[in-house]
Image (tube, rainbow, N blue to C red):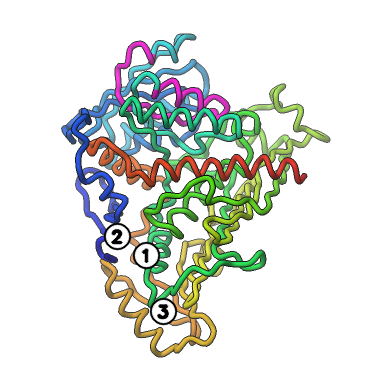
Amino acid sequence: MMKRSFLLIMTTVIPLILLSLGTKEASGSDKKNKSSPFNGLKGEVKLITLDPGHFHAALVQKNNYDQISAQVFVYAPSGSDLNEHLQRINGYNKRLENPTHWEEQVYTGDDFLDKMLTEKKGNVVVVSGNNKIKSDYILRSVEAGLNVLADKPMVTTSEQFSILEKAFETAKKKGVLLYDIMTERFSVTTLLQRELSQNPKIFGSLQPGTNEQPAIEMISVHYFYKNVSGNILVRPAWFFDVNQQGEGIVDVTTHLVDLVQWECFPDQILKKKDVQIIGAKRWPTTFSKEQFTAVTRLESYPEYLLKDVKDDKLNVYANGEILYKLKGALAKVTAIWDFKAAEGAGDTHYAIMRGSMANLEICQGVEEKFDPTLYVEAAKGIDLIGFATELENAVKALPQIGMKLEKITPSKWKLIIPDQLKIGHEAHFAQVTIKYLEYLKAGKLPEWEVTNMITKYYTTTSALARAKKEK
């Protein structure tokens, strides 16, 4: 089971070492849906990029895929968002090492959405942009019988959530697949944390948790000023408007809520009734005019941001925290946005799962040189000699070549992960895309994926509503 649930695949499709799960999540698509139009043939998947406004749209195309046609149809309004997207694709095509071969066919008429829906030149719509209109894009696309691969978050408000539920119902009726891009599942430390948590001889059972020590806790820290694909990222001004981008409590926390579900209750169907929001809060990140200009290259705030400007400083509700129960287990997720990371650092992820036998903790701080690191710490009263033997056996049983343990204290160990397994955040977009291609070929998503996506967005949007009431 352990080897089957964490399988290392060396692939020649893209110039990366890709990790692909072989758990029950794949078994949900083992038997091909006879009505599926996809057979895994070269170029059968034809991408449509709809109104790209976030760099994640381009990251889907950072690599070539045999199953995806080189010709991509882009429908968008003309402007800086589109230009930035096309420049990134062009950069991937022109790079010296492993260049891509995308051929972008662009339509920029005012009727770009209706034109896309009428022409249907592709069969998979990639949606990554302004979150205010994303739910409408998703619903309109599936109503037209198009598959959708959407960047997170698919929705940012309770009102949009009802649209998303309708979109999933429509996708089922139309026989198309609606899926969101959950890259964090493919981080090697997260995969290992999940894997070891399923070993009762190491983790025991997940503890119910307390407010002070939740069963599972995650903190994600992100930065507005960052490097993407070798260049300083230029963010659109609307990214700072919570009415368009959404607040932090419904943005980055999407990944964290997804990981709580995926790690604590793997392959299980989770429903809205399994969620109980205990508390939620939100707070702003404050920018100077100079910082705003450095990220957007704009000399002044646009009119729609003036509502958030005080004393010439911009306040963005980019931070949020949710305390909630999922099937009785207490979880806490926190998203934090700062302006710029310290030298040598970047976005960071912290996560701890508390078990009856041990805690599994991912740290990415100064002590780890900002490299994600997984620690295993035995609980008090555990036979450390016997536990150490079981942990050694568990690590040896993992299919990852070269995995080692380093003893930190009598009760704490660090997993030494080979560098070739640390492929980075941008590469995870290829892994998600490959997983989606597998689902397209199968003609269906695992049932738990669909139900859990709905539950995930119910959690985030309900938390935002709760946080606004508690302010």
Instruction: State which quarter of the image contains the N terminus.
Output: bottom left
Task: Count numbered badges in the picture.
Answer: 3
Q: Residues within 10 Å of mark 2 (few under 14, many from 20)?
A: some
Check disc 3 and report the residue beneath it.
406
Q: Residue furthest right?
A: 311
Q: Which residue is mark 1?
A: 195
Q: Hey, which quadrant is residue 76 in on the image?
A: top left
Secondary structure of residue under mark 2: helix
For marks 3 and 1, give the one nearer the viewer.
Answer: 1
Q: Identify the amino acid type marked 1.
A: Glu
Residues in magenta, as a range: 116-142
Read off the residue under disc 2. Answer: 5
CB atoms of marks 2 and 3 within 8 Å: no
Secondary structure found at label 3: strand
Mark 2 or mark 3: which comes first in sequence?
A: 2
Q: Is residue 405 left or right of residue 331?
A: left
State the SS at label 1. Answer: helix
Residue under the image location 38 percent in, 47 percent down? 448
Query: Nearer the N terminus, badge 1 or badge 2?
Result: 2
Relative to the observer, which residue lies in front, 246 or 93? 246
Q: Which quadrant, please, contains the C terminus? A: top right
Q: For the residues marked 1 and 2, what is the alpha-carbon distance in whole angstroms?
A: 8 Å
Q: Are marks 1 and 2 in contact (CB under 8 Å)?
A: yes
